[in-house]
Amino acid sequence: MSSTNPASGTSLGRRLSLAGVLRLRRPSEIWFKPALSSVAAVAPPNLLLLALGRLDLAMYTMAGSLCALYAHNRPYAARARTLAGVVLGMLGGVAVALGTASLTRNAVVLVTVGALLAAVQKALCDATRVGPPGNVILTFVSSAVLFVPQTPGRIPAHLALAAAAGAWAWAVGMAPALVRPHGPERRATAQALNAAAYAATRGTGDGHDAARAAGYAAVQAAWQTLLSLPATGIRATTRRSLEHLVVRAEVALAAPADTDPERLRAWARVLRGTGRIPRTGDASADADELLGADAELTARPAPLRRRLGPLAPIAVRTALGCALAGYVSLALGIGRPYWALVTAAALYQANLTLTWSRAVQRVVGNVTGVLLFAALVPLAHLGQVLLVLFCLALNFGAEALITRNYWLGSVCVTPMALLITEFAGYQQPGRLITERVVDTLVGALVGFLAAVAVTNRRAGDRAEQAVTAADLACERAARLLAEADPAPAALEAARRGLAAALTELRATADGAAGEWWGRALPQERVVLAEQSGHRTLAEAVRRQPARRDRDTATRAEDVRR
């Protein structure tokens, strides 16, 4: 697997390469869902405010409405909890921003509070793995609210508007459950099957290591999706059926030579429809396969404090970069320093290499979006109805395009943000365009320099820990395989644990390799751990048919007796 990984000694010139940064990918399979949800969540509040002649309050309803962008890949039981948490997090950030804005108009203080809020939002979103769009939307809203004049008496009403829109966004996000209640988990399982089938067709040729790594990541994502479903009731029955299919994908990755890729793809096609979930084979063998999953259900997740610990360098980067970007924008006389602050906040990814890529994408997307705004603004000034309709169209376009590449989505996000500033009254386009371009460049440059200055030395430590965890998981599975007749539950739990450890090792190693100034990555240990782990996984998979054959022979002998 190591052949696809950047070596720890990769030159700075290669890390700064622009190749592939702006390349368009295939759109997300469900690109239209967040796009339609955002329009459905934003349109009613905005149109109602337009009818009431209070479009100046749209900033507060937008805070709640934009929560509909989250959790589209999660099963609906988990989505309900995640969306509720996002709404509460949004309201918390808005409340802090409103309170600060009502107490002071000192721009330096406002930028400082905005930077600290951005760091907290980044750390919490990463620790809870809330998923796209992460902390960027939360930071965009809270930073914008900070720079709107406020009085204590109006805070309850503004929070109520945000809460009402957030409740509507929650309803919009949950509405598809009425039509296809098992859609997210079926889709996640289908993706795992397709990824395993693709890896099996790569053989041992070029691209096999990358395909296998992607397959294990898809399988692990499917397990996380399924294990978030209820353990009892109707949904538990669906989960059990899907778990059998995920095990088949897992087996295919460990023993690709014994895999029928077309069968996996056929199962995936059935899952994408509305038909019954396909069966995988013998019922007794299927029951044995899930013994390892039962053990995982009883495992408690790591405490939030422990998950936040490794994110400290990223949080410091965010706070420092956002604050410095805002201060530089103030020094240049820009009236909206929160644009520079939000640009910096949007840059910070898992490592410095990815942060560099996001900086390039952000600048290209924002500058192109400013040009689009210049073309749209004369039409938008013809009436507030057109202003709202343009914002809705750009909202849809942003979510529809952002999965192709971040910069392409930014082409729509930028003019939408500029048009929103005109809800309270039309402004001079030339000044808006100039300030937005300057703030984009300031935020990207200062934010990236802050990321360079704050090194993530813990990335190397986490890679060491991941290697150790993978080695221990491999040893545990190897000990069980050495037994003449290992307990099925223990063997399945060990196999599942080893697969998860290898997936975590690959993600951690990739993240550490993207840090420029950190300690050297233990590349040789990573390669050896992965090779040994995959050999052990393959042996565990081969052991399963032998055990099943013995069990079948025993049952047949009992029947004859």
Image (cartoon, helix red, strand yellow):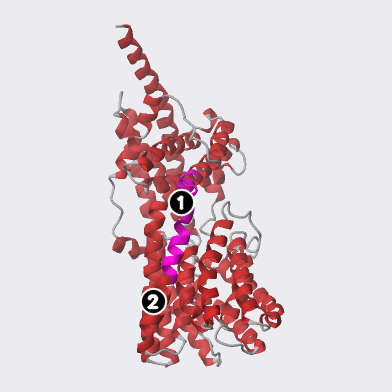
Tag shown at residue 533: none
Q: CA distance from mark 1 to mark 2?
A: 27 Å
Tag shown at residue 160: 2
Q: Is residue 327 above or below residue 452?
A: below
Q: Residue at x 68, y 83 (%)?
A: 382
Name the residue type under label 2.
Ala
Q: Main secondary structure of the magenta part?
A: helix
Q: Position of residue 422 (x, y in %)?
A: 58, 84
Q: Position of residue 392 (x, y in %)?
A: 59, 70
Is disc 1 in contact with disc 2, using a CB cutoff of under 8 Å? no
Q: Residue at x 45, y 69 (%)?
A: 135
Q: Is residue 3 above or below residue 71?
A: above
Q: Is residue 381 above or below residue 357?
A: below
The residue range painted magenta reads 165-186
Name the residue type under label 1.
Ala
Look at the image and tell me in which quarter the C terminus lies: top left
The residue carrying mark 1 is 177
